[in-house]
Every structure is written in C-alpha cells, then in structure tokens.
C-alpha cells in the first residue's frame, strides 16, 4: 500500500480524496493536513469525509506525518513551495493539483525535481480533460491559423481564480501548435466597441454560477463551419481518481517533474 497524505483534507476536494483513498486497494491514508488554526484539526479524517472512522486525525503538523508517508496529494490553494520543500527533504513523492501556479513556483518545482524529487504537477487531473488537451493540440495543428479559436470555461460560483488553469492550458496547447505566445495572443473577454476580431488572437471567456464542477469548450470557427471540443465534469471524483493514478505512477517513476500526460501515456 502506498502511504498517502492529503493536504487540505477538510476542503471539498480533500474530503473526496480521503474517501477514495479509504476505498483504494493500492493506497492507504497516512495523514490528513490542514492549515494551523483550522477548527477541524483533531477531527477524524474518515468521519469528516462521510466515511467510517479512519483513525487518522486531521493535523496541522505536516513534517510529523511525512515521517510515515510515501506520497502527498495537495489540492489546497496557496503557495506550494513550502510543502514541496518539506516533501523533497523527507523523500516523499508529491502530486500537486493546485491551479494558477505562478512561474516562480513552477520553476521551484523543476529545481527540486532536478535534485531528485518525484513530482506530478497538473492543471487538471481528469483523464478526460487530459485527453482533451491532446485532441485540442491535434485539432489546432490540422485546422491551422485560418480558424478562429475561442476557449470558454464555466465553474461554480465559489471559484476564486479566472480563467481556470485548465482553460489556460487549453489555450497554451493552441499556442504551441501555432507558434503563438500566450501572453501576447490570448484576449480575455470583450467589451464595448472593440472592432472586428483580429487574425491573431485566442478568445478566453470565464463563466461562474451555481455548483458547476467544471465545463471547458474550445471552438475552432471559420466561414461555413465550426468544430467544438468539450469536456464536462459532473463530479469531483473525476479529478480525485486521476490524482490517485498519479500517486501510483510516481511509485515506480524516476525522479523528475511530470504532468498527467506522462501519467496517462499521452505524450
């Protein structure tokens, strides 16, 4: 059994991670971590997740639980460098599902991997979404820049960042296929008398409402036709199951920084 720690165990994703780990035949729950001062510290992680008691109490002492762990899953918001440093020091593999990581944090993860850490960092852990990444890039390569490209994402009304990390990655796939630059060629929304659409832009649009887990659509349009590629998530378990696959992947992987394309063999 791969001894696994969940960071952000009291959150919505954390609770589903705990529940799925408790049902897993390959992973065991070695720890459940929350931020210092969290009112749920001391609560049994299994009970908190709506399962039978797991005899694992939620704690705010990450280093203590790392001493008896093989892997960590982190979907919590906020900087990941401190957690990554602690995992690397303890020789514990790390799966990071936190989105919207700044460039300096991504570089920090790459530096740790170069020194021997085992890390999977992905915009989205869903198997279907990672297939979508591959299909979008292939479609962009086949259709070419004569097609207009737009990315549309919708999430629940509590999501804090926009656009979603998944939407960013979808636009990056198009940029990679066309030799474009995300920072220069992605246009975030349109308002007012903006004029005709230019020949070199990827539209990016974020919708928020209700309890939508995550919908992503990429539209390629040209006079006379359009191609739409869509993924809709109806349960957070789709991300959870991908994260568990990433933990299993790292158990046998060489040190390095990987993404879900590596985990799923899509590269």
Image (spheres, rainbow, N blue to C red):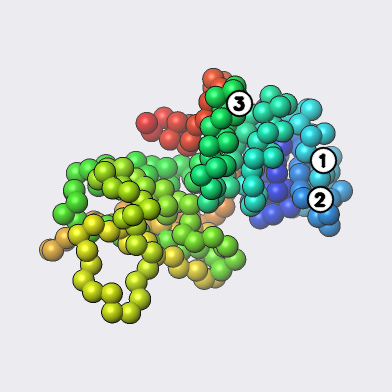
Q: Residue at x 26, y 43 (%)?
A: 179
As drawn, the label of residue 38 is none
> Is 117 drawn above or below residue 204 in the view shown?
above
Tell me which label, 2 or 3, sits earlier in the chain.
2
Q: Which residue is mark 1?
A: 61
Q: Which residue is mark 2?
A: 36
Callout 1 touching callout 2 (CB < 8 Å): no
Query: Where residue 181 sits in the image (x, y, percent)?
Result: 32, 48
Q: Residue at x 54, y 65 (%)?
A: 156
Q: Residue furthest bottom?
A: 192
Tell me which label, 1 or 3, sits earlier in the chain.
1
Q: Which residue is mark 3?
A: 117
Q: Residue at x 59, y 23 (%)?
A: 115
In this rendering, would 136 be left or right of 214? left
| Mark 2 residue crowding within 10 angstroms, few (<14) / some (14–19) / many (20+) | few
Q: Residue furthest right?
A: 42
| Mark 1 residue crowding within 10 angstroms, few (<14) / some (14–19) / many (20+) | some
Tag 2's secondary structure? loop
Tag 1's secondary structure? loop
Tell me which label, 1 or 2, sits earlier in the chain.
2
In this rendering, would 42 be left or right of 232? right
């Amino acid at each position: 059994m791969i001894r696994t720690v969940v960071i952000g165990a009291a959150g919505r994703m954390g609770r589903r991670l705990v529940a799925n780990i408790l049902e897993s035949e390959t992973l065991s729950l070695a720890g459940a971590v929350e931020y210092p001062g969290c009112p749920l510290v001391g609560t049994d992680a299994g009970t908190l997740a709506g399962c039978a008691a797991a005899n694992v109490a939620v704690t705010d002492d990450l280093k203590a639980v790392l001493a008896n762990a093989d892997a960590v899953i982190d979907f919590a918001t906020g900087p990941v460098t401190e957690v990554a440093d602690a995992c690397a020091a303890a020789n514990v593999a790390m799966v990071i599902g936190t989105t919207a990581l700044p460039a300096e944090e991504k570089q920090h993860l790459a530096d740790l991997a170069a020194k021997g850490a085992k890390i999977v960092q992905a915009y989205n852990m869903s198997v279907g979404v990672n297939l979508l990444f591959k299909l979008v890039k292939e479609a962009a390569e086949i259709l070419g820049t004569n097609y207009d490209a737009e990315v549309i994402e919708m999430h629940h009304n509590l999501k804090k960042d926009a656009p979603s990390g998944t939407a960013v990655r979808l636009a990056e796939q198009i940029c990679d296929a066309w030799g474009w630059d995300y920072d220069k060629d992605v246009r975030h929304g349109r308002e007012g008398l903006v004029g005709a659409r230019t020949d070199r832009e990827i539209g990016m649009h974020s919708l928020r409402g209700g309890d939508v887990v995550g919908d992503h659509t990429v539209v390629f349009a040209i006079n006379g036709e359009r191609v739409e590629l869509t993924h809709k998530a109806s349960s957070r378990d789709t991300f959870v199951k991908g994260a568990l696959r990433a933990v299993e992947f790292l158990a046998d992987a060489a040190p390095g920084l990987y993404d879900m394309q590596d985990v799923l063999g899509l590269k």
